[in-house]
Amino acid sequence: MTRPPRRRVVTALVALAAALPTHAAALWAQEARLPSMLVPASWLAEHLREPGLVVLHVASARQAAAFDTAHVPGSRFLRYDRIAGDVGGVAVELPTPERVRDAFAELGVGDASRVVLVGDPMSAARAWMTLDWLGMGDRAAVLDGGLTAWRAGGHPLSRERTAAATPARLTIRPQPERVVDAAWVRSRLRDTGVTLVDARPTEEYTGADGGHMHMLAGHIPGARNLYWERLMVSREDPRFRPASEMRALLEQAGAAPDRTVLTYCMVGMRAGVTYFVRRLLGYETRFYDGSWDDWSRRGLPAVRGAEPGAPDAR
């Protein structure tokens, strides 16, 4: 057998080495996976310096100054408008998968990374939903309780500017079925295997508020109400409730484990929490990104009042 020239062998080995993650990152990817989609502050504090772990603080641009004065050491600031913005006149919509991929890759999220999301429950959960849509849900987690829990645990906050991240190579595997549009929702209004969960406050859901701006008053026909804050311990303690309690709340709203749940709110922020919890519990879930804003703009049917037999969801 004729051996390939030595120069070709060396070139191939160099290319192979460049394509592989570092040894430490590879070990992290194989042996130190995130324990759950939801991690406590104590876990993050213990693993904060692990190779391959990227901590992202998700917030709006106007909150950048607050991040500069107090953040988890080493965390990087992800402006919310990089992963959700105005699309076709509808607010807080997902851009293309490629644009979202670039937003994460520019902050150092790569193929060997694990991501912990820090922020208020809505922002962190919405960012997790976005990563799930990109096919990365199994590599991402939310910090339970955000900075409130981090402080309560006595963990240090930093004022130091985090060093600029080295852009990473990030391969995505989009899951388009996770996010649905108005046509998908409308075609399933009579489907007994699908439950619609409205994550807005009761007065918005029932239409008692009279509608918001251009939006209709009421909710999508057949939707049940579970205000997203009920899934949290309290506003002062923004950790998620125990799994058994969240499961019970969902079932009271008709979101049984054997059903596909479609969750929505006003513009797709609050519904991210419901989506996250359903996925955390291992249940089939869909996300209506356009939510009530999109539904109203299309002039689709709206129902006032509570659905018959629905529990008080305040």
Image (cartoon, rainbow, N blue to C red):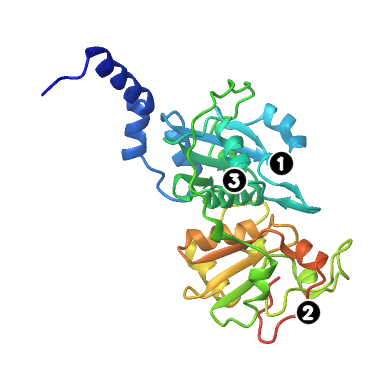
Judged from this view, the residue extending furthest toward the front is 2
Q: Secondary structure at mark 1?
A: helix
Q: Give the distance between the C-alpha atoms of the residues marked 2 and 1, in whole angstroms.
A: 32 Å
- Left or right, 44 with reference to 301: left
Residue at the disc numbered 1: 81
Label 1 Cα crowd, 10 Å radius (few <14 / some 14-19 / many 20+): some
Q: Position of residue 33 (x, y in %)?
A: 38, 42
Crowdedness of circle 3 by 10 Å Cα count: few (<14), some, many (20+)?
some
Inspect the image, locate mark 2, and give the three-letter code of the amino acid beneath it.
Val
Question: In the displayed structure, would residue 5 be above or below residue 112?
Answer: above
Front disc: 2 or 3: 3
In the rendered image, residue 211, in percent from the top left (x then y), is placed at 86, 68
Q: Give coordinates of residue 88: x percent, y percent.
A: 78, 52
- Secondary structure of the residue carrying tag 2 is loop
- Between circles 3 and 1, the one closer to the viewer is 3
Q: Residue furthest left?
A: 1
Q: Which callout, 2 or 1, points at the residue further toward the start of the chain?
A: 1
Farthest-out residue, bottom: 308
